[in-house]
Amino acid sequence: TAAEKGGWSSFMAKEISEEPEAVANTILGRVHDGQVVIPELDGLDELFAGISRIVIVGAGTAAYSAFVGKYAIEQWARIPVEVELAHEFRYRDPLVGPDVLVISISQSGETMDTLMAVKEATRLGAKTLSICNTQGATIPRESDAVVYLHAGPEVAVASTKAFVAQITGLYLFALHVARIRGTVTPELQADAIQELADLPDKIRWILENEQERIEQLAHWMADTRSVLFLGRHVGYPIALEGALKLKEISYIHAEGFAAGELKHGPIALVEPGLPVFVVVPSPSGAPVLHAKVVSNIQEIRARGARVIAIAEAGDAAVLPHADEVLRIPLAGPLFEPILAVVPLHIFAMGLANAKGLDVDQPRNLAKSVTVE
Ligand code: G6P
């Protein structure tokens, strides 16, 4: 009802506006004396010290947040991480056992594919941890441990605020385990905590300064038939998420690619006028990746692509090469994805609105898929 939407035109609009709080509430109560301590994981230090591998399973948007989490867990906790779609994991006789932690990510905690993967992991003797947004759901009940996100109920079928909360939850988990394993210095731990704490205000900055312009852009692009999304490193799963969201609610063909893979195939798709969103790494935080992505932009632009860059405010190097620049505040390289995804969520919603579609209830999709 209109009252539940709190004055917003859709649940999706409301939930995007709640992305800052979703991140802030997930952090709340999990930082003590300058270190990440997740109270729910109390008593599991020995487990985390002993595991040799982590497998993260999920479906849809949750699988993309898992993919972002992999970079942080490997970098901070120095544990090898694999990410696998839950339905693929379940039926391929996966190599997991007691030294493996299987983390499931699920907003609803009811996705059957993910639940079956967790049960299979348990059957094989692995330890299971659920990262979930819904208190008391089936997946957390079937898992050895659970870290709840506190993004609040998500109603729109397309996941938005849960996605940023999932990445935040995975980062907190990575820092918690890194503390136990002694793989990050107190300074690095403090820096990372500061970066996380700064995210809500930075997301607000995007909503306040860029939302209108992004919606306008989406409006102009209402007739678009196909859109590509490119990213590198943590920007790669963000490109995948941007493409998924556009498919889900605006029914436009969209594909996400790793920017480095462009020359190995996808560049053949580029023709004059094709809109391509590019997640640009920070010029100061990741100069090498930044230069590589700018050169990717030049390659597609030379072939007539219409480049929409998502770039750090102040990144002057990207300006001459992009048709549009959507700005995000400066953040460390690992924290950029939580910002870069916000314009993509707004864009997908704006385009679906421009086409007059029901953004909350897209055709053929369910919020929670409880069948295999
Ligand atoms: C469905 C929804 C997606 C969601 C996926 C996983 O397919 O349409 O938006 O990302 O399920 O849902 P979960 O609740 O497990 O995160």
Image (spheres, grey):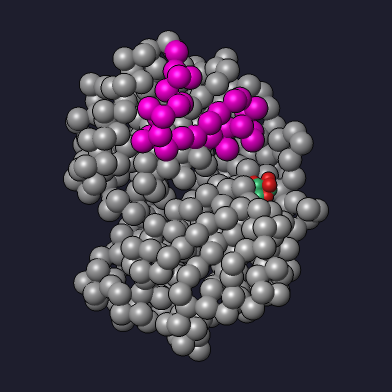
Quadrant in the rendering for residue 328: top left
- Residue 223, x across and y down, in percent: 57, 15
The N terminus lies in quadrant: top right
- Residue 156, x across and y down, in percent: 66, 45
Q: Which residues are magenta?
A: 243-271
Name the residue at 80% across, 53% down: 371
- Residue 33, x across and y down, in percent: 31, 81
> Is 267 a magenta residue?
yes
Q: Nearer the viewer, residue 351 or 246?
A: 246
Residue lying farthest to the right in this orientation: 371
Magenta part, dominant SS: helix
Residue lying farthest to the top in this orientation: 272
Name the residue at 31% across, 28% down: 296
Say above or below: 286 vs 269.
below
**Position of 334 compared to 83: left or right?**
left
Name the residue at 75% across, 33% down: 363
Quadrant in the rendering for residue 134: bottom right
